[in-house]
Amino acid sequence: AKADCECPLYFISNIIRGKYMRKNLKKLFSYYKPYMGIFVADMFFAFGAAAVSLVIPLVVRYITSEVVYWGSSQALHTIVQLGVFMLVLIAAQCYCNYFISNYGHVMGARIEYDMRAEIFSHYQKLSFRFYDDQKVGQLMSRITSDLFDITELLHHGPENIVISLIRIIGAFVIMINISPRLTLAAFALVPFMLVYAYVFNKKMKRAFRMNRVKIADINSQIEDNLSGIRVVKSFANEEIENEKFKKGNDGFLDAKKNSYRYMGGYNAGLTAFTTAITVVVMLSGGVMIARGKGNITDLITFLLYINVFTEPIKTLIDFTEQFQNGYSGFERFMEMISVIPDIKDAPDAQPMQEVKGNISFENVSFHYADSDQMVLNHVNLDVPAGEYVALVGSSGAGKTTLCSLIPRFYDVTGGTIRVDGQDIRNIKLSDLRNHIGIVQQDVYLFAGTILENIRYGKPDASREEVIRAAKEANAHEFIMNFPDGYDTDIGQRGVKLSGGQKQRLSIARVFLKNPPILIFDEATSALDNESEKVVQESLEILAKGRTTFVIAHRLSTIRNAQRILVLTENGIEESGTHAELLAKGGIYQKLCEMSNLS
Ligand code: ADP
Ligand code: MG
């Protein structure tokens, strides 16, 4: 069933009937479990707050119908006592409201905390394949706006239902005991009010949702524009951008106007209904008194009860909307939480110590999950520990893919990859990845200092170790040129790292990690000749004594390789040293000639 379906009854009945829904609801309730104490207390105080609002009119009724007739001295005494009693009640209600508002929200915040931690750690587990077809923005909104809706429902839902039902039912029962006829008059308009409130609330909430969509559009438009501002300027397209923006901005304004129109209608209408109910009660009460069939105290009591039952009607109507938002947010949350990571430790995964770095591909085939196109077909390859192997081939030949199979970013679809003779699918994933160092063309540096970024390669490394790694990576010198040296904040204004500098930081990371197996995927491809030389130098130092795969286009990077593999759609077509392959006069020689490799 669609969560945003029009009719709440249909929606609720679907939840109760659907097994899947029932499972979800069970899971939803399970988040309360650690906070049962607060939850029960919250319900208790909600009950208290509602009870007080039911009792106060009764006290007033007692005073106006009995006490005032007792003769002044006795009456005065009792009225003062009752006044004090009412103050106590109001203080109690005040505390109830404080408790609900404070601890109820805190409970909601704690549940939100748990859910946020759960989904974040779930994100950490999901594999490359999952992230290949996800938008970061959507993953973010699962954590931000969806969780907000869910916890609003989780903590306001139960207390609102308790308070509202007790107030409405309680008021109705008390009123009908005082005067059935007047009760009929007081509730006569309620069905109309319900329909009105429901319809307008629905429209209003839909309009506000539209606001959110429009502002999200505007935000992404601004982000897109600012990220590409240099392109805008180089094409002198500022005016066109302004025009484009005006469209979005106008759309948002119109959406806002629309939502405020409904909001106005909703609030003004409900106030009018409340007033109309008061008028109806006054008129019917007045007529009844005039005809000798009623009395003034009943009328006063009823007037006092009007707000007691009209307010919660609004709350309940709001709740239907809150429920649908919160519940559909929860469904999306569950959908995400139930994604099973496709790459994880086998139940009997082995730890891996003392890795030498022998790597073998046995009949390895691979295609990505979203296509049947084979990227690798029966690849066989033996790389003994410590060998320096270069992979060449046209773009799209599968070089990156082949290398990403070694740390199990993806699992082979056929055949086996072994490290030191052990099938990598039987090795503990974290052990496997801890023994492989990767340097790619794009370096991602996290917010924080240079020191922290290098230390990412070995979280418990000392400052000295970090500095040694930076020196080995040819990075020490430029780092020391910053006023704050290793403590330079990378995100700070004015700190701009060149591609080569970033690359050297990422190499320092790998030095620190000290893995026996290395993968350089076009690590120097984006660099100018000058920085390429420096980076290449540190890469060669890093590669000493480690099994190394190098993917590169530049001849300088690969000519020294012990073995060069030429990858085509038919697999590894040629293999040998630079001299051997040139002499052979095959694909490699042609690649060199086309100066693809130069
Ligand atoms: P190379 O590194 O040799 O340029 P890749 O290994 O990146 O080649 O790509 C090999 C093929 O696999 C290409 O056809 C590419 O479009 C496809 N491919 C690469 N990455 C993915 C992915 N994450 N999902 C689906 N297809 C991919
Ligand atoms: Mg590639």
Image (cartoon, helix red, strand yellow):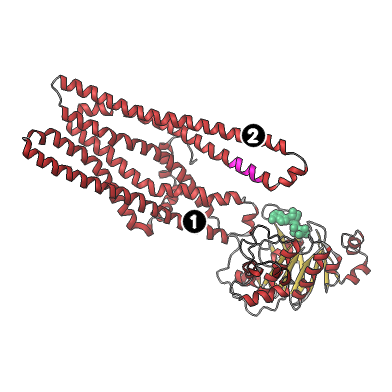
Looking at the image, how many numbered discs can be counted on the residues?
2
In the displayed structure, does residue 480 sit left or right of residue 115? right
Task: Give ligand 2's quarter of the image.
Answer: bottom right
Residue at the spot 64% in from the left edge and 34% down from the top edge: 246
Classified by dominant secondary structure, the portion drawn in magenta counts as helix
Task: Kindly identify the amino acid type of the residue bearing the numbered disc 2.
Answer: Lys
Is 221 colored magenta in this rendering?
Answer: yes
**Magenta span covers which residues?**
216-223
Q: Residue 424: horizontal and vertical position, in percent?
A: 65, 70
Residue at the spot 46% in from the left edge and 46% down from the top edge: 149
In the displayed structure, does residue 484 sit left or right of residue 381? left
Q: Which mark is residue 246?
A: 2
Q: Residue 188: horizontal and vertical position, in percent?
A: 29, 26
The kind of secondary structure element at disc 1 is helix
Mark 1 = which residue? Answer: 116
**Position above or below: 456 against 19:** below
The label nearer to you, 2 versus 1, is: 2
Residue at the spot 79% in from the left edge and 72% down from the top edge: 537
Is 396 in front, or is 221? Answer: 221
Disc 2 versus disc 1: distance between alpha carbons? Answer: 36 Å
